[in-house]
Structure formats: structure tokens, C-alpha cells
Amino acid sequence: MPEATFRFYEELNDFLPRERRKCQFSYRFRGDPSVKAVVEAIGVPHTEIDVILVDGRSVGFDELLSGGERVSVYPVFERLDVSPVIRLRARPLRRTRFVVDVHLERLGRYLRMVGIDTLSPADSEDAAIVESSLIEGRIVLTRDRGLLQRARLQRARWIRSQKPREQLVEVIRCFQLEDGLAFFSRCLVCNTPLESVSSTAVGQRVPASVRVSQESFTGCPGCGRIYWQGTHYRRMRQLLDQLGLPGEPVR
Ligand SMILES: [Zn+2]
């Protein structure tokens, strides 16, 4: 059987068994498969990969291997300029938008809380998530490796942490979103940007005690929810302070 030498870089090593991490290893295959097929057989989803070098030459996913090659595989570089080589996908999206899978609902809510455009489809079907990613140019966030192997999916990140708070920090750091945060500027439920609403316009939609104690309100033009700086707000604010995230609430 033909074999080639592989080396995976940076966080792509998360997908490998310990003995294959951060070192060269040989891998055997049958026939003359595409480099994409072999890399996925090794366990690394194509959505995590941005650049593949075969014997020092950058190639597309469909490059065929026949044996004897040296293959280097690099992750999606959201923050590095690697323009002289072929990137395996379109340029990074300028406005970073996400769609989370059904198991990351808390993360979705947290991302909306800091003002990042994030959809949580009610439909838990993988197909609906892939569709939303392709049509609206959203990056899929998931912990489901099966979803990452979907052939049509182009941009996705496999979330490492299992705790929603850490996941929030992971996404912000990974996509370098620190400068674009606008706390409490989006509806936590439906993702629509909020608008300020006067206390008279709020009317009966909030309890009378809230109407007299609060000065400023925001409302969601999408689902009609009204937000104000009550106990819930203070708890969320505390969480953001604990996480040390920059950003100010939008008034
Ligand atoms: Zn809403």
C-alpha cells in the first residue's frame, strides 16, 4: 500500500491521537485518493483546514496522492496573512456572524449578549444549520464532529471547551472579536438589534414597578421583548466583568 508522511499544525492536533500530535507520521492508503479524503480519514475535518502543502507546494482539496509525498496541513488562519499560498476557501468573512448548533444554546445566548450576530436555529437538523451557514455566510460553531464532516460546509469551528462561559471567551479570542463587542445590543432570544424605547412607549409591556424605577429601556423590533437594567442585567454584567471582556453596554 502506498504511504505518505503527514504533519498537522497548531490546533489541528486536537483531532489526533497523542502519538500523532505535533510530529511527522506515515499513513497508508489505498489507490490514489484525494488529499481531503486521506486527511479526513486521519480524523481532521476539512472545515478546520485552510492550507495544505504537498512537498512544499500549496494544493487544493482534490489533489491526488500516489505515495511518497510529504503533506503539511494548516488550520484556518483567521488572523495570519498567508496570501501567497492557495487558501482552500474564500477570504475570511469581514463581518463575523455565527450559527450555533442545538447543543450550544447557552453559547448562542452569551454571544448575542455581547452583541455578536448569532443564530440558534429552532430546527435541530444539521441540514438547516449548513443551509444557514451557506446562504448567510455564517460560521458554524459546534462540538459535533459529524456536522463538521458535511461536504458542503465551508466555515466552521469545533468548540473545544464544554463550559458555556469558556466557550464564549474561546470564540471571542479565536476570531479576535474583542474590539467589536457591544454588550446588550441584541435580543437574547431572536438576535435582532435592539432599539431604545421611551418609558411612555413601553406602557403596559413591563410591570408598573419597573416603569417607575427604570429610566431607560430597549426593545426588540423582531419579537417585541422589552429589556431594562434589572437584576438579570446585573447578573449578566457581573459575568462579563468576571470574564474580563472589554466592551460597554449600548444605551
Ligand atoms: Zn427579539
Image (cartoon, rainbow, N blue to C red):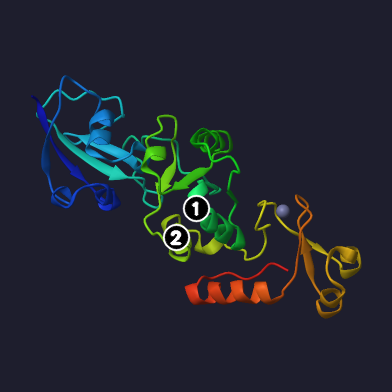
SS at badge 1:
helix
The N terminus - image quarter: top left
Does any atom of ligand 1 lie closer than 8 Å to the CB of label 1? no
SS at badge 2:
helix
- Residue at 60 percent across and 51 percent down: it is 117
Judge whether 82 appears above or below 154 on screen.
below
In the shown orientation, is residue 11 left or right of residue 220? left
Q: How many marks?
A: 2
Name the kind of residue labelled 1 in the image: Leu
Instruction: Tell which residue pokes out farthest to the top in this image.
Output: 31
Q: Give the residue number, with chain letter if any, for mark 2.
A: 167
Checking the image for residue 238, the label placed there is: none
Q: Give the residue number, with chain letter if any, for mark 1.
A: 104
Question: Quick check: marks 1 and 2 in contact, CB under 8 Å?
Answer: yes
Judge whether 232 appears above or below 66 on screen.
below
Residue 225: image quadrant is bottom right
- Residue at 72 percent across and 74 percent down: it is 229
Q: Of label 1 and label 2, which has the lower sequence position?
A: 1
Image coordinates for residue 184, horizontal then vertical, percent: 66, 65
In the shown orientation, is residue 248 left or right of residue 63? right
- Residue at 40 percent across and 59 percent down: it is 162
Marks 1 and 2, how far apart in space?
Answer: 9 Å
Mark 1 neighbour density, 10 Å: few (under 14) some (14–19) many (20 or more): some
Name the kind of residue labelled 2 in the image: Gln
Relative depth, front residue between 225 and 91: 225
Judge whether 2 appears above or below 146 on screen.
above
Q: Nearer the viewer, mark 1 or mark 2?
A: 1
The C terminus - image quarter: bottom right
Instruction: Tell which residue pokes out farthest to the bottom in this image.
Output: 213
Image coordinates for residue 249, horizontal then vertical, percent: 66, 69
Relative depth, front residue between 138 and 14: 14
